[in-house]
Amino acid sequence: MIKMEIQEAEREFVVHPMFDAPEVKRSGEGLGLMHLSPTVRCCLFGLRAYLFAMVGMLGYHLLDLAGLFGRHAIH
Amino acid sequence: MPLLLEKTSNTPDAVRAPSSGIYLRAPRLKGLVTFLMVMGPGLIVMEADNDAGAVSAYTQAGAQYGTHLLWVLLLLLPITYLTQEMVARLGIATGEGHAAMIYRRFGRWWGNFSLIDLQVTNFLTLVTEFAGISLAATKLGIPPIIAVPTTAVGLIFLVTSGGYLRWERITIGLCLLDITWFVMAAVVRPHWGDVAHNSFIPTRPVGGVTSGLVFLVIAIVGTTIAPWQLFFQQSCVADKKLRFSDLKWSRLDTAVGAVFTIIVAGAMMLVGDAGFRHGITFVDPGQLAVALEAHYGPFVKTGMLLMMINAAVLGTMAISLSSAWAYGEVRGWPHSLHRGIKEAPGFYAVFVLCVGAAAGIVLIPNAPLYLIILGVQVLAGVMLPSAIVFLQLLLNDRELLGEEFVNRPWNNWANWTVVAVLFALSLVLAAQVALPSLFPAS
């Protein structure tokens, strides 16, 4: 009996993450927006302008390729 | 040795542990068994990225430049690992998806922008996946009108009918089918000396730096690291409920996935290299598969066509799920593969809509597929650096993550370098689109 208990204690118990007790995670709820330094804000504003310009250019190029502007169309 | 899990309840939120689990007779196996339990999101996100577009990009790279671009793949290995490790860490720390985090920490504007950008890029990519299925099925003698809807219905059934674990096991099985690429690479008998040399030492291909070469390098980078991967892995990690203690195993999962994926990509390039050695030119990889039959027999042809379909299926599943998870997170809908259709109707509706609409577009006669493929390559290239910028900012958010999960200084140096390189590549891509004469034509 004692031997069995020792053997039981020596066994490793492994639980699948999906069936384990839920953990308290680091939730962003209630924290609000991230504090950003003026430099980071400025960079994000630049990023916004960059993305608009790039998407606009891509859209124009694709419409051009589709022949919307009366030039070379690709099918 | 008992290896079965005992589930305590059918409703995932109510499962209780540690009353359920397994006892191991050999304690030294604990690490291995835990890894096998945690494994999935990292392998799937990496291997699903070897999608239809990737097959096209890697085989074209091989067919046009032989083994000369293998070093690019090796260079991408640490980059892809570092990027995905961050989302795994973020997912484990917060238990939430990427879209939800951007909304919460950067506000509505960036949240909406990221979501719309993700949905548009994903949808266009899905169209290319079904285009790949259509091309490969046609070469196998199956009409697209049968192959495309059948695949779409099969995917929808797989995702909607079985819960997370069944989905993950089947998807890992599909990922492992890509081992077939290794066999095909061996069958086409590459020059292994060149393979070893060109994998580690960049060499100048014949013809020098042309617009074709620049575009291919950017396509390889763009296809190896895609914005949807960030959203997919974080949501998948959160859906699987990985614990803080699983982080090291999740990192290993991501590393194994990255290495496996890069080796598969290399094998695709070697199959393309067979076309280079035999002077085969092609537009889509299906044509290469047919042409290679004359030199290497029907195995390479059939294997390549089936693996094209497998790649597209994996890509479609992962990309559609990343869309559905992201939309569900932002809308606050139930968004989990643990839940049935009745419990998470919005989540599954987005998935079905993505798959169904993309499949439908491919079946439209004379649909502008070329424009869609071009658009998705450039759009993904443009959006990726900005997506990684937000990831970087989130991983430096001490208020949210605490000291335990934020990036270390070396992490930040490495990642900002990656961001700078990606921005440079996206600018080159934009310049190439706007000024096609910037580089000499190939």
Image: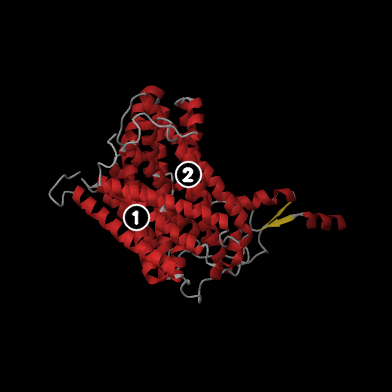
Say whether marks 1 and 2 touch (CB < 8 Å): no
On the question of residue B165 being in view, the answer is: no
The CA span between labels 1 and 2 is 22 Å
Mark 1, residue position = B121
Q: Are marks 1 and 2 on the same chain?
A: yes
- Please identify the quarter of the rendering in which residue B349 is found: bottom left
Residue found farthest to the bottom:
A30
Looking at this view, is B210 or B223 the one in front?
B210
Which amino acid does the dot numbered 2 rest on?
Answer: Leu
Residue B76: mark in rendering: 2
Image location (x, y in percent) of residue A65: 20, 47
Tag 2, which secondary structure? helix
In the rendered image, the quadrant that contains the C terminus of chain B is top left
Q: Residue at x 42, y 63 (%)?
A: B326
Q: Residue at x 47, y 31 (%)?
A: B198
The answer to whether B84 is drawn above or below residue B92 in the figure is above
Q: Is residue B77 left or right of residue B21?
A: left
